Image (cartoon, rainbow, N blue to C red):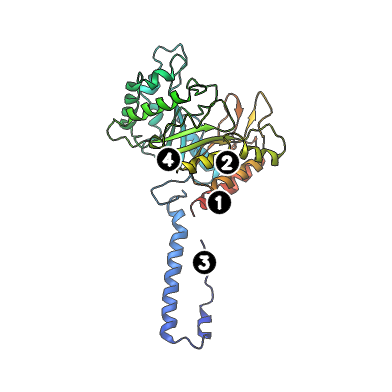
Amino acid sequence: MTVEITNFESLSALPNMNKFVKISFIIISVGVIATLFYESTAEDNSGGKIFFGDSEHQAPLGVYRGSGQVARIEEFERWLGREIGYILDFVGRTPRSVKAPWKGIDDPSDRCRPWANDQYRLVLSVAILPNDRFTLKRGANGAYDHHWKKFATALVNSGCENAILRLGWEFNGLFYPWSATGQEELYAGYWRRIVKAIRTIPNQKFSYDWSVLAGNNGADVETAYPGDDVVDFIGLDAYDTSTFTSEKDRRKDQRERIYGLDWHAAFAKKHQKPMTFPEWGLTVRRDDSLGGQDSPSYIESMLSWISSNNVAYAIYFDFDAEDASHRISSDRFPNSSNFFKKHAGDLAKQINK
């Protein structure tokens, strides 16, 4: 906030103001200006990072650029011209042929070390089943509890005891071994077992993000909700995909579709939880035309939505996956890239009000 007082000489033009009052007014005004100046420069004193809430909370903007890629995160910050507060990573998936399928869960320290004791808050996407040789039913019955105790112990010992754990993300799709399709209650029960096991480990301070994939009706997600006592954030992965072609219709569809933006806000409010966007981004899909390509309209609508809702963090997926391209920091999306760079800082400032 900026307040400009430029005309102290005008005080002398007030005939009914005595000298003592004039001096008092000037002292108070100077104090106000000093306070405002301190507040307006707090952002610079923090090294460029935008804080929200208080100085212990980091900026809501985050990014994913590949597992453990510290140099790529720093490169993104230079491109953006500001620091980000959150980073995303993934751990735990293994092929069926691997002899030690739980290795990534039993010891996730390699996913922790690059971010331990760093300025970023780690959001770790955790595969709750390493591959389809294992089942939600066995997990819900406690068969894998010992793996989760090892998992938590390794993270605590590696310096990531305050990570946000995104257990079994996008469970309403059909493509992960922990898909909740037709077994929503087992998914919820297994989630509860995992959190219960993790909470037995000393010094752990983990938070939990329950993350849904927007627009996918592969499971009844509300039946798969494990409970307010084991969830801290309600997440939504919200990419620019739609069957509609016009920008106006795409934005409307992304708000109103099943498990879309409107549902997300309503469900989070109902459960009194902050919203998150662990993954969001522009999309060019390799196998269909559902992606919105270079769409400043999508970026604008998402920044506006994030800034006007109770969002704890929003992590841009600046990475080209096997099935789609998303990198806004590349030259593939020039119009969206320019809009994002110009307004991302404003987003954080709006959230910080």
Please name the residue that numbered disc 1 is placed on: 346
Q: How packed is label 2: few (under 14 Cα within 10 Å), some, or many (20 or more)?
A: few
Left or right of 58, for residue 322 = right
Badge 4 density bin: few <14, some 14–19, many ≥20, Cα 10 Å: some
Residues at discs 1 and 2 in contact (Cβ within 8 Å):
no
Query: In the rendering, at what x and y percent does residue 220 appear?
Result: 53, 28
Q: Position of residue 189 (x, y in %)?
A: 40, 26
**Mark nearer the N terminus (4 vs 1):** 4
Q: Amino acid at mark 4?
A: Tyr
Q: Could you tell me how far apart the alpha carbons at marks 4 and 3 are, in whole angstroms?
A: 33 Å
Disc 1 to disc 2, C-alpha distance: 23 Å
Compared with 150, 85 (above or below) is below
Residue at the disc numbered 3 = 3
Q: CA distance from mark 3 to mark 2?
A: 37 Å
* Disc nearer the start of the sequence (4/2): 4
The kind of secondary structure element at disc 4 is loop
Asked if one can make out residue 148 in the rendered structure from this viewpoint, the answer is yes
Q: Residues within 10 Å of mark 3 (few under 14, many from 20)?
A: few
Residue 335 is left or right of residue 53, and the answer is right
* Helix, strand or loop for disc 2: helix
- Marks 4/2 in contact by CB < 8 Å: the verdict is no
Check the image and report above or below for 43 versus 142. Answer: below
| Residue type (three-letter) at the residue carrying disc 1 | Asp
Task: Report how far apart the C-alphas of labels 4 and 2 lie in the structure.
Answer: 29 Å
Q: Nearer the viewer, mark 4 or mark 2?
A: 2
Instruction: Identify the residue under disc 4.
Output: 120
Sooner in the amino-acid sequence: mark 3 or mark 2 = 3
